[in-house]
Structures are given as structure tokens and as C-alpha cells.
Image (cartoon, grey):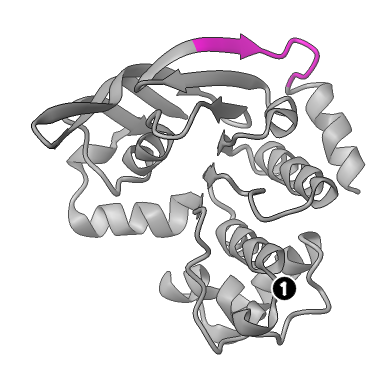
Amino acid sequence: MLELEHVVKHYHSGGEVVRAVDGVSVRIERGETMALLGPSGSGKTTLLLLIAGLLRPDLGAVRHRGRLISAMSKSEASEYLLRDVGLVFQSFHLMPRVSALENAARKLLLSGVGLREAKARAEPWLARVGLADRLDYPPEQLSGGERQRVAIARALACEPRLILADEPTGHLDSQRSREIVHLLNAVAYEQKASLLLVTHDRDAAELADRRCVLRDGKLVDTQEHSSINASTGRLDRVRDMA
């Protein structure tokens, strides 16, 4: 589903080379979840942006469903980001003075779905993140955690094949964080999507099928959670969300 082969992305800063991503190779299958851990500055967000097509690698290949992301035209890359990718940033990027429901429907609207249908498709996702009673509230009237959940609903409303979540629980308390990570895992299973979760939260990482550590741009450790697999453990997580 998602495959990275020897991906490199370096920056030049103050006469020095910053090796943000330095020869990363990894594969995430359909319906599989992977948590990416690492200290600040280790290259996690850069890697996410390369997968999303918002950056191009200096070397190596990023493929989604066999398509080479860096070879896409500008219009193809935009279509990929709108229809295939559910991207959750650390910052929310919500539209001010617009309701939570319309914010959650934003990607659907941009992809050509009519307003009424887009709202109808986005509303259940707001309910799943616990905001059924906040549909008409603009971001200015929501807490940081509620704004984060609107952004997550927006990412999931288009039913993406690839979910890229950059610290999606950073503004949430521990209980809500666990609920959101369970939801992301459940959605990956239900929709046969690949999930890459960038997090500092080791408890959240433990819920993924695999855990990887990125340090100085390199994958230095990977661990598969044998107690959680696509056929049994993921079903238990889905039942937990019911």
C-alpha cells in the first residue's frame, strides 16, 4: 500500500547539512497501523510531508498503491492529497468563523462534493470524535482539544486510503487521546487504509501494529506487536469503539 525505498531529504542550514530523512526504507500494508516515535528534530514530520507529496525526496522513492508520488503532476498531487490522504497536522488549519460541521466537510467540498452531501457525510465523523453537540460552533468557541478533533474528523470524512497523523493527541487529555487512537486504528481496519501515526506518546504507540523509532533521519529500531494483529487484536479494538 505505502512503500518507501531509501528515501533521502537533506537541508542546508548555516553551512551544515541537516539529514532530516537519511535512507529510510519501510512498507505499510493495507489495514496496517504503524507508530513512528523519535525526539524533536529527528525527521518525523519531514517524512510525513514526503509521503503526503508536499515535499519531494532528494533520493529514493515513495510509492502509494504502486504510484510514484514524486512523479505526479501538480494536479495529480493535489488530487492524491484530497482523495487518498487523510492528513492531520499538529496545527489545526481550521477556517475561522465557520462551523465545526463545515470545517469537517471542507475536504469533501474541495473534491467536488455538494454542500448538503458533504455535511451529511462529515456529521457522523464529528459524532465519532465526540462533537455531536458542537456541530454549529466555530473554532473560536471550541477548546484546543475540540479543534483538534474537528481536524481529525475532516481528515477521516473523505474515507482516505492513507491516514497520516502528526501528533493527533497533542492537545487531548489521556482518556480522549486513547479514544482517538482507537478510532484511527478502527478506521484503518474498517477501510483497509494504512495508518502512520507520528507521536511522542508511547501509550498511543503501543496500540499500533508496529512501532518504529526515527533518530537523526534514520530508522534505528522497529518492533512488531505480536499480540495485536489484523485478524484478532484489531477486531477487539473495533469492538471497543462500538
Q: Does 41 sit above or below residue 215?
A: below
**Quadrant of res 68:** top left
Q: What crowding class fits label 1: few (fewer than 14 Cα within 10 Å), some (14-19), or many (20 or more)?
A: many
Percent position of residue 196, x then y: 54, 35
The quarter of the displayed image where residue 64 is located: top left
> Residue at 18% across / 51% down in the picture?
73
Query: Residue visible at 18% across and 40% down?
Result: 71
> What residue span does the magenta drawing correspond to?
221-229
Residue with the most extreme front position? 14
Residue 199 position (above or below residue 143): above
Instruction: Name the residue located 28 percent from the left edge and 39 percent from the top edge.
Output: 69
Mark 1 lies on residue: 123
Report the number of discs: 1
From the viewer's perspective, tell me whether residue 107 is left or right of residue 226: left
Q: Is 71 or 34 nearer to us in this picture?
A: 34
Q: Classify 113 as above or below 185.
A: below
Q: Position of residue 29 (x, y in %)?
A: 54, 25
Q: Nearer the viewer, residue 24 or 220?
A: 220
Q: Please state if 89 lies on the left or on the right of 197 as rendered.
A: left
> Which residue lies at the image location 21% right of the left edge and 40% below the top edge?
56
Q: Which kind of residue does numbered mark 1 sit on?
A: Glu
Q: Secondary structure at mark 1?
A: helix
The verdict on residue 209 being magenta is no
Q: Position of residue 2 (x, y in %)?
A: 44, 29
User: Is 141 placed left or right of 103 in the picture?
Assistant: right
Q: Picture coordinates of residue 61 (x, y %)?
A: 26, 26
> As rendered, which of 62 and 114 lies closer to the eye?
62
Task: Determine whether, in the image, residue 90 is placed left or right of residue 188.
Answer: left
